[in-house]
Image: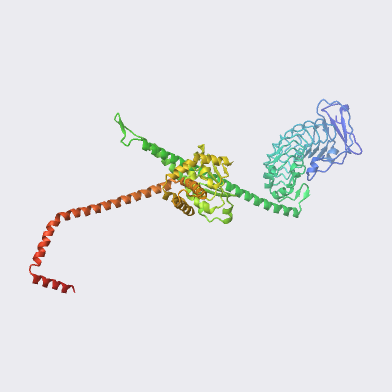
């Protein structure tokens, strides 16, 4: 039977097992002062013990209970404290059976040793459950508490958030001071306003979708390095991230997309030690009112706005540069593809020409009655495919002109047209290096005079993928004003495979006093070796040319000097001074080199056409002369044959005419009179 004892200053509660004798009763005395239900919970309140009850007076009667204890209250106590029950600091290891208290709304088990939540499933009207500072390892036994709005499980041993599926009305969830490593199983709590996960083992924040009512999130004293999904919380106002491992704003960039956040803390993180910390946060979160529990002033906001504008300008400029770089990359790739296709077409044409020249000019051979011939269809189809590809590339940017510092870079043959632009004097004077890429060398030769005029300070030429295939092509560079450095990239320039190509360049362009070739310094020994190797070649070339060809090669000043030397050569044989000999030698060397020139294929083809036209004209002219001479000769022969008869007739006519002298005289006088 239940036993009730009145105490002057408190309630008399009896906890007993099912039907034990009176000696097994455990008595508690509880103060009448019960804390009021909190109207609003702040994060500081939730981290601390929710209510202090150090003044409770407890009398405990020792007994041995083989099962859960049963808690019963008197009718008077139920009337006085009808909706709440406080059992804190009672050294409980289990939740007692609470019988006849289905109307309870507040239940407090703070500061006990409870390891499991149980025996409260019948309290279906419960709104506030406080199990702070116990030894609970798992969230369980709450599935029937559908009215629960406040659940305080701080300072326990919970490792995982679970079994909250039925608590859809939950307003406050306090799980601080546990061992939770991941946020999970809370997406259904659409009415949750306060979530406290401080002092856990979280390393990242995500999986917050669905918490549409959350206004306060406490994540202080964890191991968080990055935050996600916070921008998906439409009502979040306060976020506490103090004392974590956040080292970069990029790791919490989602916060900048939150329109509702007004208070946030980052103190105790590595990011808070950076000089740019405060300005960066304010730049990205202009709606903040408090940062690290300090109100943001208008001056701070204004400075952050100014810095934000500058940062935005930098980003726009950076984005612009990125776009330009990407466009440059795409253009160069397109030029490279077009160049590759052109080379393949040229190779096919060259191969076909060789086949045509090697094959006999006769009908296809007849073998066993069948005709065997080359397969022009295959060659034609490949050629057509390449041509189609080239036409497709032509609609995209097919060339690129870029000035970077003192370097002018030209990609694609179309870039050569840029030399006709009106370059500013400053830009043109600044360019000292000109780089040619994916351009036929023969096309470059045609613009070298323009290059000399437009960029007079260009000292360094670079060639990559320009089809430099023979030493003779270097002769064309002699027409430039000056070259100090020359770089021939092995890619697309087979000429560098020749062992002596550098020596030939030094010999042919010796008047430039070249300093570097392909980045290597030119020495005096290199110059001597170049002269030894190719000096005789130039002498032989010049000795085979007639004087008019030598004079046409030289400039005006050199022509006068050359003629003077030729004139003085024969005036006083044997009495030529040393100065004249030296001058002659110098002119001869330069003349010898000048004879080693280069004619581009197009120019050579033009010359061939011109020569053909001249030959044709000469042939026609000679033919006309021969025809005219033949006709004259034929007339002369005909005259010789007719002349004897003609002479006889002339004599006869004269004799007949003067036979009557008087008549003849009258006739002559009449003719004279008629003429007057």
Give the vertical position of 634 relative to 119 (above or below). Answer: below
Q: Position of residue 278 (x, y in %)?
A: 74, 48
Q: Residue at x 13, y 71 (%)?
A: 668
How many marks are shown on the rendered structure?
A: 0
> How are the residues colored?
rainbow
Q: Is residue 280 left or right of residue 398?
A: right
Residue situated in front as seen by the camera: 263 or 570: 570
For this orientation, the residue located farthest to the left is 660
Whether residue 77 is visible to the viewer of this picture, yes or no, is: yes
Q: Position of residue 447 (x, y in %)?
A: 49, 50
Q: Is residue 297 left or right of residue 540?
A: right
Viewport quadrant of the C terminus: bottom left
Q: Residue at x 40, y 47 (%)?
A: 605
Whether residue 444 is visible to the viewer of this picture, yes or no, is: no
Give the vertical position of 302 relative to 68 (above or below). Answer: below
Viewport quadrant of the N terminus: top right
Q: Position of residue 165 (x, y in %)?
A: 69, 36
Residue situated in front as seen by the camera: 213 or 431: 431
Q: Position of residue 224 (x, y in %)?
A: 73, 39
Q: Is residue 604 left or right of residue 222?
A: left
Residue situated in front as seen by the camera: 565 or 224: 565
């Amino acid at each position: 039977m239940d036993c009730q004892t009145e105490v002057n200053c408190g309630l008399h509660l009896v906890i007993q097992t099912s039907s034990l004798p009176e000696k097994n009763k455990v008595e508690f005395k509880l103060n009448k002062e019960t804390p009021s239900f909190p109207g609003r919970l702040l994060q500081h309140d939730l981290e601390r013990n929710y209510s202090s009850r150090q003044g409770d007076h407890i009398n405990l009667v020792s007994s041995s209970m083989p099962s859960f204890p049963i808690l019963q209250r008197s009718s008077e106590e139920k009337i006085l404290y009808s909706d709440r029950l406080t059992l804190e600091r009672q050294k409980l290891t289990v939740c007692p059976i609470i019988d006849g208290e289905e109307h309870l709304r507040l239940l407090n088990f703070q500061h006990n040793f409870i390891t499991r939540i149980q025996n409260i499933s019948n309290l279906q009207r419960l709104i506030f459950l406080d199990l702070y500072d116990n030894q609970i390892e798992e969230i369980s036994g709450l599935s029937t508490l559908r009215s629960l709005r406040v659940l305080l499980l701080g300072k326990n041993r919970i490792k995982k958030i679970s079994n909250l599926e039925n608590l859809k009305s939950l307003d406050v969830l306090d799980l601080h001071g546990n061992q939770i490593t991941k946020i999970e199983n809370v997406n259904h709590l659409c009415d949750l306003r306060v979530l406290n996960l401080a002092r856990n083992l979280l390393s990242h924040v995500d999986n917050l979708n669905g918490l549409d009512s959350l206004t306060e999130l406490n994540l202080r004293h964890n191991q968080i390095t990055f935050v996600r999904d916070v921008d998906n919380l439409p009502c979040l106002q306060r976020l506490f991230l103090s004392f974590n491992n956040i080292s970069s704003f990029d790791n919490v960039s989602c916060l900048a997309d939150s329109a509702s956040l007004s208070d946030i803390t980052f103190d105790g993180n590595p990011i808070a030690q950076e000089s740019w910390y405060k300005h960066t946060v304010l730049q990205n979160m202009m709606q903040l009112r408090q940062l690290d529990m300090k109100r943001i002033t208008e001056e701070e906001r204004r400075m952050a706005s100014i810095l934000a504008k500058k940062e935005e300008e930098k980003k726009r400029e950076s984005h612009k540069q990125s776009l330009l770089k990407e466009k440059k990359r795409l253009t160069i790739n397109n030029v490279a593809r077009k160049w590759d296709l052109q080379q393949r077409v040229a190779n096919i044409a060259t191969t076909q020409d060789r086949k045509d020249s090697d094959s006999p000019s006769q009908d296809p051979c007849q073998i066993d009655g069948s005709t065997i011939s080359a397969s022009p269809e295959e060659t034609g189809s490949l050629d057509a495919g390449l041509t189609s590809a080239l036409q497709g590339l032509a609609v995209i940017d097919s060339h690129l002109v870029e000035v970077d510092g003192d370097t002018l870079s030209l990609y694609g043959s179309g870039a050569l047209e840029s030399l006709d632009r009106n370059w500013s004097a400053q830009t043109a004077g600044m360019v000292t290096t000109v780089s040619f890429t994916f351009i036929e060398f023969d096309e470059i030769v045609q613009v070298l005079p323009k290059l000399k005029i437009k960029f007079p300070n260009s000292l360094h030429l670079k060639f990559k993928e320009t089809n430099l295939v023979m030493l003779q092509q270097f002769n064309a560079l002699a027409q430039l004003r000056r070259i100090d450095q020359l770089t021939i990239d092995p890619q697309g320039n087979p000429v560098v495979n020749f062992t002596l190509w550098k020596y030939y360049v030094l010999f042919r362009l010796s008047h430039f006093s070249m300093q570097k070739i392909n980045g290597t310094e030119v020495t005096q020994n290199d110059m001597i070796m170049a002269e030894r190797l190719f000096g005789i070649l130039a002498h032989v070339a010049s000795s085979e040319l007639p004087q008019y060809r030598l004079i046409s090669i030289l400039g005006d000043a050199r022509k006068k000097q050359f003629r003077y030397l030729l004139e003085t050569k024969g005036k006083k044989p044997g009495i030529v001074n040393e100065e004249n000999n030296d001058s002659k030698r110098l002119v001869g060397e330069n003349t010898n080199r000048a004879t080693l020139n280069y004619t581009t294929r197009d120019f050579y083809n033009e010359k061939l056409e011109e020569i053909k036209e001249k030959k044709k004209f000469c042939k026609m002219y000679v033919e006309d002369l021969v025809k005219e001479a033949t006709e004259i000769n034929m007339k002369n022969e005909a005259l010789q044959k007719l002349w004897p008869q003609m002479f006889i007739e002339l004599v006869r006519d004269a004799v007949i005419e003067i036979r009557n002298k008087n008549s003849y005289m009258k006739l002559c006088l009449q003719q004279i009179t008629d003429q007057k």
